[in-house]
Image (spheres, rainbow, N blue to C red):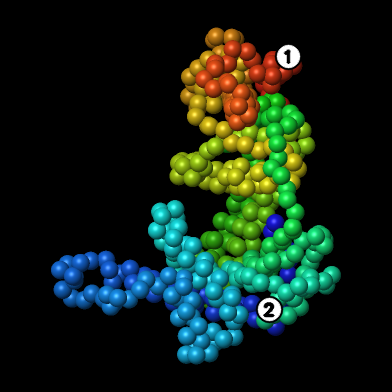
């Protein structure tokens, strides 16, 4: 597990952290330039070179991968004494991170790695920690010594600190500890009350039980303040003292937005786990939604963060079974009889002419998701239900009809 704590370093320790970050940034930029030069030297054939100039490396020059650059880094310490002031493993982790970014670009999973200016190198990693490096007052870090920590919770004796990542944020410095325990935690088995969740923008989520949560607009609350600060930043000279002060203020506003959103997501995830033993969600690619006309609202709601990161983690901690189902046609299917009910986005009420079911569109989609999730569990257990049509209303849809909740229940998470 990874736990995050706030650091309270002294002025000397802050200067040490900034110096390490600057050396790591130089190593990243130099290593990236080596890779880019090797790539540029092999872009064109010999008979297709530019008439004016062409960057050419020797034919037998090896590609500067992690192992080659790590060996060169050891030799470069004799030429550049500043490299010897930083822990060798910290610099090796920079090269490893560059290797991961390069492979991700090569496999077309992300963009090309970028050169980092001083404000973009935000973290450094100490991959090995000493034993008994944690006390009630702080943590002992290589090169920095004992640093005071604001312990928000106690680390059990069962866990061992494997590595520490120092992160620089707008509100200060944080340490992210990787904890390991020699225990075997079995996977959560399906049990208890099933709940299907439909994610959207009109309602952040709608459950198969008829509950609907309004989408909070985190950005709207601080939009005016952010707009004013960015307008003032436009009139400042780039790189001046006032320009840097405004940059820090803007970063604080963005961090406040992110922290508020994450806190709300965790509270909502715990609320869902209080009354559910199984949670099923749609398997959606939110990167496509971000590119549309509602991309700003999608990013503000943090749908991907909630569905793919926070909710699975909370379900794991709360011993709640979590699973994703096929999202195709969940809003075009009747949860009671399984008939196809075509409707566009403007139609917000589900009305099945086959069985007469009437309920909110998102609630009906949540019930379909719940039914599909339970079918997936039955298929995994070997029950022969593949290809069988739904001839009876699901238990959740039947409960919805009994209570007559045709309009849904709207709840608010403070």
Closer to us: 15 or 181: 181
Q: Give x and y (percent) for residue 149.
A: 77, 69
Location of the C terminus (image quadrant): top right
Q: Is residue 349 above or below residue 119?
A: above
Q: Which residue is mark 1?
A: 402
Residue at x 54% of width, y 61% of height? 230
Residue at x 47% of width, y 62% of height? 101
Q: Give x and y (percent) for residue 381.
A: 63, 29
Per the image, label 1 sits on a secondary structure element best described as helix
Q: Compute the Cα span from label 1 to label 2.
A: 64 Å
Judge from the rendering whether residue 125 lies leftward or rightward of residue 160; answer left or right. Answer: left
Residue at x 72% of width, y 18% of height? 399
Name the quadrant containing residue 13. Answer: bottom right
Crowding at label 1, few (<14), some or many (≥20) Cα neighbours within 10 Å?
few
Q: Give x and y (percent) for residue 286.
A: 52, 42
Q: Of callouts 1 and 2, which one flags the residue occurring earlier in the amino acid sequence?
A: 2
Residue at x 78% of width, y 37% of height? 274
Q: Is residue 238 visible?
A: no
Per the image, label 2 sits on a secondary structure element best described as loop
Q: Which residue is mark 2?
A: 142
Q: Which mark is residue 35?
A: none
List the single residue furthest toward the front: 382
């Amino acid at each position: 597990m990874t736990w995050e704590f706030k650091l309270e370093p002294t002025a000397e320790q802050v200067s040490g952290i900034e110096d390490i970050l600057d050396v790591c940034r130089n190593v990243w930029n130099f290593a990236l330039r080596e890779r880019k030069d090797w790539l540029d030297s092999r872009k064109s054939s010999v008979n297709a070179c530019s008439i004016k100039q062409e960057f050419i490396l020797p034919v037998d020059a090896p590609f500067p991968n992690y192992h080659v650059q790590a060996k060169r880094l050891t030799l470069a310490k004799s030429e550049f004494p500043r490299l010897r002031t930083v822990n060798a493993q910290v610099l090796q982790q920079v090269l490893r991170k560059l290797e991961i970014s390069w492979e991700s670009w090569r496999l077309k999973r992300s963009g090309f790695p970028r050169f980092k200016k001083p404000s973009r190198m935000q973290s450094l990693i100490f991959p090995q920690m000493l034993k008994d490096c944690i006390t009630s007052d702080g943590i002992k870090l290589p090169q920095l010594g004992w640093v005071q920590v604001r312990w928000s919770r106690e680390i059990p004796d069962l866990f061992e600190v494997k590595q520490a990542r120092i992160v620089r944020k707008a509100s200060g410095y944080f340490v992210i500890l990787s904890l390991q325990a020699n225990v075997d935690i079995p996977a959560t088995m399906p049990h208890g009350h099933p709940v299907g969740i439909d994610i959207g923008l009109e309602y952040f989520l709608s459950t198969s039980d008829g509950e609907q949560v309004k989408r909070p607009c985190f950005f709207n609350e601080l939009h005016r303040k952010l707009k004013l600060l960015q307008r003032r930043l436009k009139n400042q000279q780039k790189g001046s003292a006032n320009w840097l002060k405004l940059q820090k203020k803007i970063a604080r506003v963005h961090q406040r937005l992110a922290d508020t959103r994450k806190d709300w997501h965790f509270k909502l995830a715990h609320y869902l786990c209080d009354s559910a033993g199984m949670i099923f969600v749609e398997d959606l690619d939110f990167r496509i939604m971000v590119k549309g006309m509602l991309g700003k609202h999608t990013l503000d709601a943090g749908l991907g963060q909630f569905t793919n990161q926070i909710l699975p983690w909370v379900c794991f901690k709360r011993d709640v079974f979590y699973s994703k189902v096929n999202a195709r046609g969940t809003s075009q299917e009747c949860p009671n009889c399984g008939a196809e009910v075509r409707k566009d986005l403007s139609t917000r009420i589900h009305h099945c002419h086959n069985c007469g079911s009437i309920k909110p569109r998102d609630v009906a989609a949540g019930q379909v998701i719940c039914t599909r999730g339970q079918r997936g569990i039955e298929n995994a257990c070997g029950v022969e239900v593949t290809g069988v049509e739904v001839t009876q209303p699901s238990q959740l849809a039947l409960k919805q009809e009994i209570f007559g909740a045709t309009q849904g229940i709207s709840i608010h998470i403070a």
